[in-house]
Image (cartoon, grey):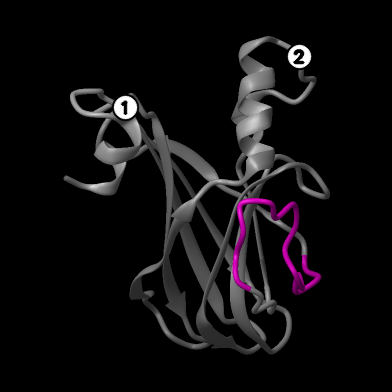
Amino acid sequence: MNLLAKLLGKGERRHVVELEGVLSARIKRAGEKRFRDLGVIARKKVTDAFVAHLVDSLQNQTSTPIDTFKYHDSGTGTNAENKTDTALQTPCGEARDTGTQIEGATGNIYKSVATHTYAGSFAITEHGLFSASSAGTLMDRSVFAAINVVATDQIEFTYQLTCTSES
C-alpha cells in the first residue's frame, strides 16, 4: 500500500486539482538568423500568491483580472524556487516583456510566449511570470542552468500552465 493510501485510509479517494508550470526557451545569438531550441528548462508548481489571487478572482475580490498574468521577467538569481516566492531573486533590471496569450496543445493549458532582447551581458538563471509590467503578483518563478547572453542576444520564453482536474 502506498503512503497516500495509508494516510487516507483504505478505499478513500483523494480529489486533487493540480497546477503545473513548464518553462521552455529558445535562444537567438547576435547575428544569427534563427532561434535554437533549448527545450524544457524548468518544471514546477505555481506560487502561493498566484493561488490566493485565483481564489480571490473567483470571488471577484481582486482589482487585477486573472488574464493579466502575461509579463515575463528574467534574472540572475540562483536560490532554489519556492512556492512562497513573490519576486525574482535578482532581476536583470531590464523591462518586462508582454507575452502573447494563447491556449496550449489542449484546452487545459494556458500558454504565454515572450521574447526578450538583452541590452547587456548576463548569465540568465531565473524567469518569472507576473500580473503587471512592474511589481504585480508572481505566478511562477523558475530557476535553471545559466543561459549566457550578451547585448542583442534574444531569449524566447514559453510558459505553459497545465490545469489538471481531479484524477
Q: In which quarter of the image is residue 65?
A: top right
**Identity of the residue drawn at 40% across and 36% down:** 18
Amino acid found under the numbered disc labelled 2: Gln
Amino acid found under the numbered disc labelled 1: Arg
Q: Is residue 64 above or below residue 151?
A: above
Question: x%, y% of residue 58?
Answer: 61, 14
Q: How crowded is mark 2: few (under 14 residues within 10 Å), some or many (20 or more)?
A: few
Q: In this view, does 97 lie above or below 10?
A: below
Q: Which mark is residue 14?
A: 1
Q: Is residue 95 above or below residue 14?
A: below
**Identity of the residue drawn at 54% across and 85% down:** 146
Secondary element at tag 1 = loop
**Identity of the residue drawn at 28% across and 29% down:** 9
Main SS category, magenta section: loop
Residue 85 on the magenta span: yes
2 and 149: which one is in front? Answer: 2
Q: Which residue is denoted by mark 2 in the rendering? A: 61
Residue 105 on the magenta span: no
Marks 2 and 1, Cα distance to the nearest angstrom?
A: 29 Å
Question: x%, y% of residue 10?
Answer: 20, 28
Q: Quadrant of residue 74?
A: bottom right
Where is the C terminus found, in terms of image quarters?
A: top left
Left or right for 149, reference 76:
left
Q: Give the range drawn in magenta.
A: 80-94
Say which of marks 2 and 1 sits in front. Answer: 1
Where is the N terminus found, in terms of image quarters?
A: top left
Left or right for 32, reference 65:
left
Nearest to N terminus: mark 2 or mark 1 = 1
Q: Quadrant of residue 81?
A: bottom right
Question: x%, y% of residue 111?
Answer: 43, 42
